[in-house]
Amino acid sequence: MVPLTLEGSYCLHQMLRLRWPAWKGLEAAARERILKQAAEALAALEPSQSAAYSMVGHKADVMLVHFRRTMDELNQVEWQLARLGLWDYVELASSYVSVVELGLYETTGKLHDSLTAQGVEPDSDAYKAAVEEELARQRKAMEPRLYPAVPPHRYICFYPMDRKRGEEKNWYQVPFGERAHMMHLHGMIGRRYAGHVKQIITGSIGFDDWEWGVDLWSEDPLWFKKLIYEMRFDEVSAVYALFGVFVVGMRLQPAELAPLLAV
């Protein structure tokens, strides 16, 4: 059985590196003009669900995170930024495209059992109508989670991940009930960190190289380590998870861009 999902905002992560030699070679007046334009552009984007982060480590200097209602709007943001003067002095180290996703394992199981008990055949018109009715109800109830604001917390951790589908361990061949139980236990761990970590899961199957993207926000980056470490011992992660590259950084306000890139 395939678990139902709800989708909301589309999401784009852009990891940027500054071309320092070229940037340092500019006259001070040119740098000032370019930074003023970039700061104004970022300030204009922020109310529309965008945020900038100063990254720690070699993987990127700055990460931009954008949430938009449509894929088209994400593409418009890309082109809008590409026209900035600053874009002549950065290179895209990486990017990630996904969509906010809420998995409905529990709802899927209950709905299937209820409809089956009523004699409604899977894939029948009546079954599909009942599923759409339930999804519509869930979308309305979950709208704030499906179309989130960028959390205001200072620190961010982002990483992509897959579920294993190898010869010995294949998540997609595990019976639905077992998957649902494991996901329930997995989710209970995350709930224990609710006061310390804000999490947004985005689905990327068909959009990017991994299956999901995970964003974590906190006022203390140490909570990222604590949460992810504990989840390593959970069966979903210990047996069935594969993880991509982790990046971590801190919120960068538009007005802080000039001091950060001063030479």
Image (cartoon, grey):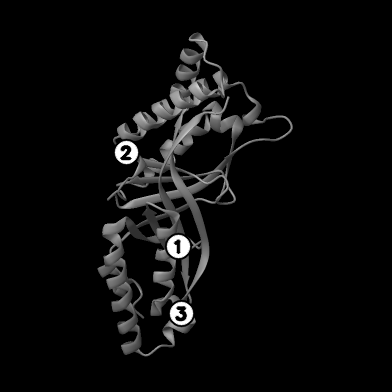
State the residue position of label 3: 88
Q: Residue at x 33, y 78 (%)?
A: 262
Q: Quadrant of residue 46?
A: bottom left
- The crowd level at tag 1 (other Cα within 10 Å; few <14, some 14-19, many 20+) is few
Q: Are marks 2 and 3 in contact (CB under 8 Å)?
A: no
Looking at the image, residue 115 lies above or below residue 72: above
Residue placed under numbered mark 2 in the picture: 143
From the viewer's side, name the closer residue of 68 and 258: 68
Query: What amino acid type should be assigned to the residue bearing mark 2?
Result: Glu
Residue at (48% x, 77% y) in the render = 19
Label 1 or label 3, whichever lies nearer to me, is: 1
Residue 75 marker: 1
Check whether the beta carbons of the residues at disc 1 and disc 3 lie within 8 A of each other. Answer: no
Q: Mark 2 to mark 3: distance in Å?
A: 38 Å
CB under 8 Å between callouts 1 and 2? no
The answer to which of marks 1 and 3 sits earlier in the sequence is 1
Residue 79 x, y percent position in the rendering? 43, 69
Q: Secondary structure at mark 1?
A: helix
